[in-house]
Amino acid sequence: MPAEPLNPQAAAAPRVPARRYGAVAMTLHWVLALMIVASFSAGLYMTGLPFSPQRLKLFNWHKWAGITILGLTALRLLWRLSHPPPPLPACIVQAMPGWQLVAHRGTHLLLYLLFFAVPLAGWAYSSALGFPIAWFGVVPLPDFVPVDKEFAEAVLKPLHHGSAYALGAVVLLHAAAALKHHFVDHDGLMDRMWPFSRQGHAR
């Protein structure tokens, strides 16, 4: 027997199937999610390795992943601007406290900001160290900033690391909120982005 929702307003509100994100938006969301988790995990792992060919290989893959994340984020933002997301169902808006609505919107804005900030800071850090990036070893990218190793170590490295940890924290907060809506509130909010929902996605 399913658990009762903790929010009585949500329980009293009629359940109307939420409009869902389209297939492109869902694909970009989950591909970016997987890449960000993998890139963050690789970054944590490789920083503890001694200097070796394996470490250099991981650093290159980490850079290529960052540039790919940057490009996919730009594509996702352009898609979102041209394809507005489905509005939150009225029953969910009515049931959510005001601070949760503010947090919902603020978290999404912060995620987009960090999606750009983290790879851009990493690109700048690599450029300032004097290590140009060739995407997948094929496409050479311009240096983002002039070579300045002191600036790289004093400013850009902490900026890249700090923004990466901030992104990790916001991603965890975002995931926790989605799971709370799904398993505690039972309001169907997560179905809007879950590709395996029984509801058909938007075109």
Image (tube, rainbow, N blue to C red):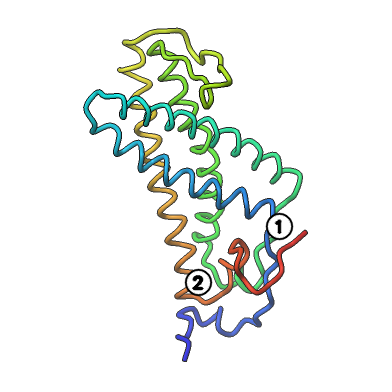
Q: Amino acid at mark 1?
A: Gly
The residue under the point 42% across, 7% down is: 147
Q: Please name the residue that numbered disc 2 is placed on.
A: 182
Taking the spot 48% from the left edge, 30% from the top edge, the residue there is: 119
Q: Secondary structure at mark 1?
A: loop
Residue drawn at the location 48% of the way across and 81% of the way down: 5
Q: Helix, strand or loop at disc 2?
A: helix
- Please tell me which residue lies in front, 195 or 96: 195
Distance from the alpha carbon under mark 1 to that under mark 2? 20 Å
Q: Quadrant of the C terminus?
A: bottom right
The quadrant holding residue 95 is bottom right
Q: Is residue 124 left or right of residue 96?
A: left
Q: Residue 43: x percent and y percent?
A: 35, 36
Does residue 147 sit above or below 176 in this rendering? above
In the rendered image, residue 163, in percent from the top left (x then y), is placed at 40, 35
First along the sequence among labels 1 and 2: 1
Identity of the amino acid at label 2?
His
